[in-house]
Image: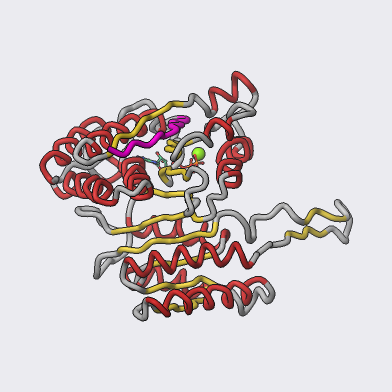
Amino acid sequence: MTSASIAVVAGDGIGQEVMPAAIRCVDAVTAHYDVSLDWREYDWGSDFYRRTGAMMPVDGIDQLSKHDAIFLGAVGTPDIPDTETLWGLLIPIRREFQQYVNLRPARTLPGLTPVLRADQPIDMVIVRENNEGEYSEIGGRYARGTEAEAAIQEAVFTRTGITRVARFAADLAVTRRGSLTSATKSNGIVHTMPFWDEVVAGVVDEVAADHPGLTLRNVLVDALAAALVLRPWDFDVIVASNLLGDILSDLASAITGSIGVAPSANLNPPRRYPSMFEPVHGSAPDIAGQGIANPIGQIWSGALMLDHLGQPRAAAHLVAAFEQALADGVRTRDLGGTAGTEEFVTAVLANIDSVG
Ligand code: ATP
Ligand code: MG
């Protein structure tokens, strides 16, 4: 029996509703396998901020470091600036634990009509560099208020940073359809992007020496955005820098359906530090407390967590169970159905026992 210790931060708004829903589903599926998860809840988030002036305690990172993974709901509330919630919790966790891969699958799900015409099933994963690149603090505002005013923002790309994310993406592509696309803008951004292209190509050459089926396409991000809209089924794994990946991953999840279904993982692949699993959606204050939130984003994030913890069969079982619920027509309102969170979870739990 494998057991893993999971830090749970349900957070704000619908995080409080989709988190217990997802934990029930994950527990139900692990009961079929040789694994048990030990959940430890932390009441961090906006209420904690109102009480203490911080999103988490000063030793928060230290407390989290004792766990095998972090399962996060959503943080954010209309009356606290996003900068506080982001920089007070999410960004420190991503940085301190070197979660340099941000992974976002985007797939056509049964019974869901994609926003765009989809001639073929869509099944792609965006691998976004999560720790460096365009999101740096280097730079500043100069000569404020004068005619000469300027703002400079420097992007920092390192060989180590590009190599590790490219390797992760290439290894992932090998386990899938073998097609890797690298987002670039080396025609306009003349220092960092050519470096990105060069390092990615080197890594792919190395991986392809053992896996000759692996192919790499470098695509300018503007053309890639258009291609994602026109032919999303053409893509398997897309690797991109922090900024380009941020934009492309929202685009990819919008193409396949509701924001309520999209999962994400912030990974530290050598598993030296805990990785973090969270739905793409936010706290959705407009629907919080009504029992109508779609729990799929959180449940699917739980499946990514099981996969990362070395339980790919349990992960696939969990995904099959919510896909079957959708195929049976059980859908929450954001997907055009009438089911509440509880009704959807009941269907998933029944499917976990029948699809196994
Ligand atoms: P953030 O909290 O990151 O700032 P946001 O406020 O921009 O996010 P969300 O909180 O994700 O965005 O909500 C955007 C819209 O999508 C809202 O109308 C919300 O009700 C809806 N939504 C988000 N998640 C879900 C979900 N799980 N189920 C149903 N609707 C959802
Ligand atoms: Mg919000």
Q: Taking 351 as reference, is 117 left or right?
A: right
- Is residue 4 highlighted in magenta? yes
Q: Position of residue 283 (x, y in %)?
A: 45, 35
What residue is at 49 percent from the left and 42 percent from the top?
Answer: 274
Q: Quadrant of the C terminus?
A: top left
**Residue 230 drawn above or below residue 352:** below
- Is residue 52 highlighted in magenta? no
Evaluate whether residue 292 shows in this view: no
What residue is at 19 percent from the left and 35 percent from the top?
Answer: 349
**Which segment is the magenta one?**
1-12
Q: Quadrant of the N terminus?
A: top left
Name of the residue lying farthest toward the front: 1
Quarter of the figure with residue 191: bottom right
Name of the residue lying farthest toward the top: 51
What residue is at 36 percent from the left and 70 percent from the top?
Answer: 174
Evaluate whether residue 172 shows in this view: yes
Q: Taking 85 as reference, is 101 left or right?
A: left
**Residue 203 drawn above or below residue 106:** below
Q: Taking 297 as reference, is 203 left or right?
A: right
What residue is at 34 percent from the left and 42 percent from the top?
Answer: 302
Ligand 1 - quadrant of the structure image: top left
| Total tally of numbered discs in the picture | 0
> Looking at this view, is 205 or 228 the one in front?
205
**Residue 237 drawn above or below residue 98:** below
